[in-house]
Amino acid sequence: MKKKMPNHSVLISILLLCLTLLLIFGLSRQKTVVIKTANLNIHSGPGIDYPVIDTTKARQRYHVVGQRNDWYRVRITDKKFGWVASWLVNRKKPLQHVTRLSEATVVIDPGHGGSDSGAEYKNSKNPEYMEKTYTLQLAKKVAMALRMRGCHVIMTRDNDRYVGLKPRPELAESLHADAFISFHYDSSPQRNEGTGITAYYYHRGKSKQLASTMSQQFNNLPLTNKGINFGNFLVIRDNTRPAILCEMGYINTKRDFNHIKSFSYQWKVANDVVKGLNQYFKEQ
Ligand SMILES: [Zn+2]
């Protein structure tokens, strides 16, 4: 028996149904956002380097027509478009004060991790004495302090896992980060020989400026501030974004180590980093 072919009108109906579904799907994907924060800067491009072309009014609704580097492209008027920092749009609690720091993307890099324990207070298998433990404790506090001010913080690791050196600056590059800060602790060949804090830069220009502005904030810390220095470290050398590496004390010096492991020292550093970045972004 010959199969009966479906006639044309059935095919056209099916086609129309598919097109309608596609259209509904497409429209539902077009996102609108309510921007609760007033005076949020609208930039001409996705980042704080781009000029501010407008500011938002409180509780205004905008169409999001694109996204890049965690910035939303929004329609301001029929023919005018601009970019806003998506993390400020989506904040549960709107920011009271929008600053350049709140619009910035910062990569925080806790040195070492996992099988790479870094330097040690003394030879042991105990994580309590390992550099990787304290770079992470410090980095988490820095991230928290920055996020409280609206800053977009990405960490290269937020737990005790191994991360190679190369992916760290690559992360900053892929996010088009406005700053990259790596935390480490120094160690001397003999115990109790070294002391103090150093902020390293590799590239002149913005990285050196960031190191210098940041270093000035560390004067309030209980350890000697040894200022800035050139440092040939991969994470800041192979980095296209403004990048510094801070050695926040000598882990194998008893006096330094007592501060390194104290939460009050870690919080002081976190607040200094907030102040340093604030100042740095103001200077740009
Ligand atoms: Zn280290």
Image (spheres, rainbow, N blue to C red):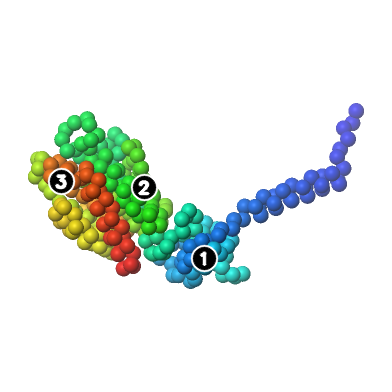
Q: Which quadrant of the rendered structure holds the N terminus? A: top right
The residue under the point 88% across, 35% down is 4
The residue located at (9%, 45%) in the rendering is 193
Q: Is residue 75 at all visible to an observer of this figure?
A: yes
Closer to viewer: mark 1 or mark 2: 1
Q: Amino acid at mark 3?
A: Asp
- Which of the marked residues, 1 or 2, is nearer the chain's N terminus? 1
Sort mark 3 into few (<14), some (14-19) or many (20+) by Cα contacts within 10 Å: many
Q: Amino acid at mark 2?
A: Met
Amino acid type of the residue tagged 1 in the rendering: Ala
Sequence order check, earlier mark of 2 and 3: 2
Q: Are marks 3 and 1 in contact (CB under 8 Å)?
A: no
Q: Quadrant of residue 80?
A: bottom right
Q: CA distance from mark 1 to mark 2?
A: 31 Å
- The percent coordinates of residue 33 (x first, y second) are 56, 58
Residue at screen point 26% across, 39% down: 133
Q: What's the distance in space between the residues labelled 3 and 1, CA to CA? A: 48 Å
The dot on residue 43 is: none
Mark before the other along the chain sequence, 3 or 1: 1
Q: Residues within 10 Å of mark 2 (few under 14, many from 20)?
A: many
Task: Provide the secondary structure element on which disc 3 rests.
Answer: helix
Disc 3 C-beta below 8 A from ligand 1: no
Q: Which residue is mark 1?
A: 58
**Circle number at residue 155:** 2
Q: Nearer the viewer, residue 274 or 180?
A: 274
Residue of label 3: 256
